[in-house]
Image (tube, coloured by chain):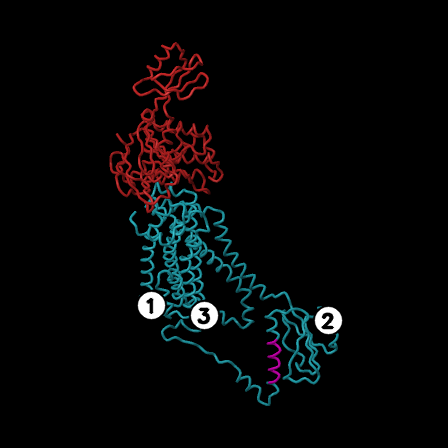
Amino acid sequence: MNKIALVLKREFLTRVQKKTFLLVTIGLPILIFGIYAAIIYFSINSTSSTRIMVVDNAGLFKDTIAPSTGEIQYEFNQQTTQKALADKAKNKEIDGYIVIAENATLNDKIDLVTGKKIGMVTRSKIKDDIQSRLQKLKMDALPINQDLLAKAKTNNEVDIVNVNDKNDSGIQAGVSYGVGMVCGILIYMILLLYGTSVMRGVMEEKISRVAEIVVSSIKPFQLMMGKILGIGAVGLLQFLIWIVLGIGLKLLLIPILFSGGGQELTAGGNASQMQEVFAALGTINFPLILSMFFIYFIGGYLLYASLFAAIGCTVSDGQQDAQGLQLPVTLPIIFAFVIMMQAVNNPTGGLSVFGSLFPLTSPIVMMARVAQGVPEAVTVWELILSLMLLFGSFLFTTWFAGKIYRTGILMYGKKPTWKELIKWAFRKN
Amino acid sequence: MAILELAHLKKYYATQKAVDDISFKIEAGQIFGLLGPNGAGKTTLLRMITGIFYPDEGSILFDGKKFDPENDIKHIGYMPEERGLYKKMKIGDQALFLAQLKGLSYQEAMTKIKFWFERLDMQSWWNKKVEDLSKGMSQKLQFVITVLHEPKLIILDEPFSGLDPVNANLIKDQIFELAKKGSTIIFSTHRMEQVEEICDQIALINLGKKVLEGSVTDVRQQFKEHLYELKLGSTEQVPPTSIFETVSQSSDKLIVRINEGHQGNDLLRYFIDQQIQVEHFSEILPSLNDIFIRLVHGTAAVTRSFHKI
């Protein structure tokens, strides 16, 4: 036991003391955050604006199509001739123009001539603008009471209320969906990232031939467990740092965002919706989700790490060898991700229930279901059964991998086949 | 007392008999040479002695008791042929880690590492990484790591490969020193001249079986071909006689084989009677290298690894 701790300590320290650890742990979230911020920033403050000249000889649009935004401006101009406009468009002085013939009616085709390429989004926005303007004008022309028409056109609010789950309604469901998805994706990434990290560690030990020196001092199983636990501890530390960072950012950013941004949102009429989202976030059982997250993180990691260790120890010359053998282990993880996408939509469906019980997929799928509420989406016994299966199979894979490991770590030369690996696992010593 | 006693040790792999019924004894304080061509089963044998593999059959007695890898491992130091260290780890930390794995406490390990680093002039290496070391330097480090915990039994697999003569001598002196202090050393190699120089006792392994065992002098005596080298005062032809046959002659140097029933003195007496001056007379004992080649030759040792059983 003491020797496992020694290996664990080495694995942990050599990874944490590296400069790249801090860089990745703190840099990565900032990078991801930055990319999202940039995407949002650019999508709001679109730099390119499209100017469209409208020569409305029939007075069809009644001098307006839509209020000008940063993105699209409609400029009405009666003086210019079509010829001059076409020249201007050719010289790219204007982006596009619309000419309405004098005898045109509301039902006629509208031609937009452009001088430059206009993006898909802008195109459909222009179409929408024109169509809704024309529609409104057509409605206005109808010989009926406009107030009644407006009333007839309003949308009714439709609220979905689950009698068994007061939280399964409206925005609430959307928020659970999001939280479940995020948790599932995180576990998915953890399994792949730390799993391959274990695999690479084992390969490195084998290829550099340290393994033989180490196993002349301790049992191969102790070396394997020490490595798995050490890398797992690095992962946990990384998550703790992220949680602390997250809480810190929340405390820092929310006041900043909502002191200035709050009014804007109110002005935009979205305040009530935002508040609802926050209210929904508030009702999510975060302590439950966090603790489940850590339990499935640990269980899933231990399950897969030992398999990845077994793969790593069969490799003797490098990365290429690992690719082929790695596939059967990464496949269930990807499979689990697919089921998880199903489970967020339909947490009680057959596939979701199976996926959340089957130990190779349960860490990812169950997180998506748990976010939708216990016991509403997941019954307590399902949760217990899933955990028992997960930790039971963790014991099995560790035993299995340990057997392969002790043979493989000192075996050089030919790449073993899966059949041989299974033979290694079931033979004595 | 024998520190290590192997009895009918066997280890079979699916396609070959790596170790096939090997028995021998190593007395405490000896330097024991384990010889054999590539693929003879040396490494497998050593791995069984170090507790990495379990033998399929047979028994190992360590220090008079049944070998118990769990506890006896800390009395063994093993330097495998394929050297390996953590490339990115600092040398001091690395030595500390491996020493602690052998069961030393942090304090003990520190003291011993300092002692050895000083002794082999390595103090300045502490904060370097293995990847910054030359091959010879990492070899020295590997040696230190092997003997750091003062094992009773030290197993060195090709300890001098890649070392320059100066460093090789340095390590050789340390080996003698350790043996003098009571450590037993198993020295596995196929470099025979080193064996002659260092080892007290040898065993030759081929095709997983023990071919030969004994002290270096005994073995050489056993394989002698009754060859003698003479330097004569005159260069004239030696008249033929029934005492010996001339094997080769070049200027004043003569190599002869004494026929059965005669001894060195008969040869000398013959030359004295012939009034030929003998300036130099010595017996030629076969080198271990010759014995090795003679025993291994023709057994297809090289292709052995592909044999089916």
Q: State the image coordinates of residue B235 (x, y, percent, origin top left).
A: 45, 14
Q: Looking at the picture, how far across and down is residue B244, in whole percent?
A: 35, 18
Q: Could you say whether the residue bearing mark 1 is in a helix, strand or loop?
A: loop
Which region is colored magenta? A127-138
In primary-sequence order, the first of circles 2 and 1 is 2
Label 2 in the same subunit as label 3: yes
Distance from the alpha carbon under mark 2 to that under mark 3: 49 Å
Per the rendering, the mark at residue A88 is 2
Q: Amino acid at mark 2?
A: Lys
Mark closer to the observer (2, 1)? 2
Taking depth in this image into account, of B256 and A94 the one nearest to the observer is B256
Q: Position of residue B104 (x, y in %)?
A: 34, 37
Chain that is red in the image: B
Pointer 3 residue: A174
Q: Is residue A134 magenta?
A: yes
Which mark, by number, is residue A364? none
Q: Nearer the viewer, residue B95 or B14?
A: B14
Q: Chain of mark 1?
A: A
Q: Earlier in the sequence, mark 1 or mark 3?
A: 3
Residue A190: quadrant of the picture: bottom left
Magenta residues, dominant SS class:
helix
Q: State the residue lying farthest toward the left.
A: B65
Q: Secondary structure at mark 2?
A: helix
Q: Colour of chain A?
A: cyan
